[in-house]
Amino acid sequence: MSNSNVNAAKGRRYTAKEKADIIAYVDKVNSEKGRGGQSAASKKYKISPLTISSWIRSGAGGGAVISGGAAVAGPIGKKLSKLQALHDQIARAEKELAKLKTQFNSLKSAL
């Protein structure tokens, strides 16, 4: 019998909040770019894409964290994560729109 299994390192354990944060990052990247969230999260957090995929499939991490750091479990948590990602995307778009309106008004008043 080989000792290789005995000496194998155990993987790191992640809290529900850590999983939720990573899944929210995946959702955010996917909402911004349409795809690539798992790969980006894998590189950023140094976690296997398969691990992230299994968390998403199982609903691990709850998908969202509400104020106070409590994780929201299940499909509602995933929807909250998606809502948060969309909210962030809208906020960025509104900020960019405000900049464009400022430039437009500046040029318009210079006429």
Image: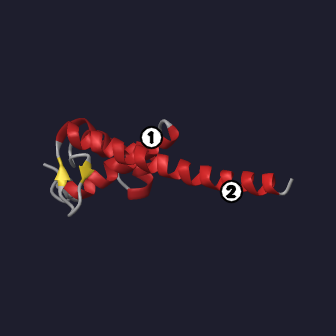
The residue positioned 19% from the left and 53% from the top of the image is 71
- Name the kind of residue labelled 2 in the image: Thr
The residue positioned 19% from the left and 54% from the top of the image is 16
94 relative position to 75: left or right: right
The residue positioned 40% from the left and 50% from the top of the image is 42
Q: Which mark is residue 9?
A: none
SS at circle 1: helix
Label 1 crowd (10 A; few <14 / some 14-19 / many >=20)? some
Single out the residue that lies furthest toward the bottom: 68
The location of residue 92, given as percent across then percent down, is 52, 52
The location of residue 84, given as percent across then percent down, is 36, 48
Q: CA distance from mark 1 to mark 2?
A: 30 Å
The residue positioned 20% from the left and 58% from the top of the image is 15
SS at circle 2: helix
The location of residue 25, given as percent across then percent down, is 38, 50
- Name the kind of residue labelled 1 in the image: Asn
- Is 38 rendered above or below residue 99? above
Label 2 crowd (10 A; few <14 / some 14-19 / many >=20)? few
39 relative position to 5: left or right: right
- Name the residue carrying label 2: 102
- Name the residue carrying label 1: 30
Do we see residue 8 in this rendering? Answer: no
Do we see residue 104 in this rendering? Answer: yes
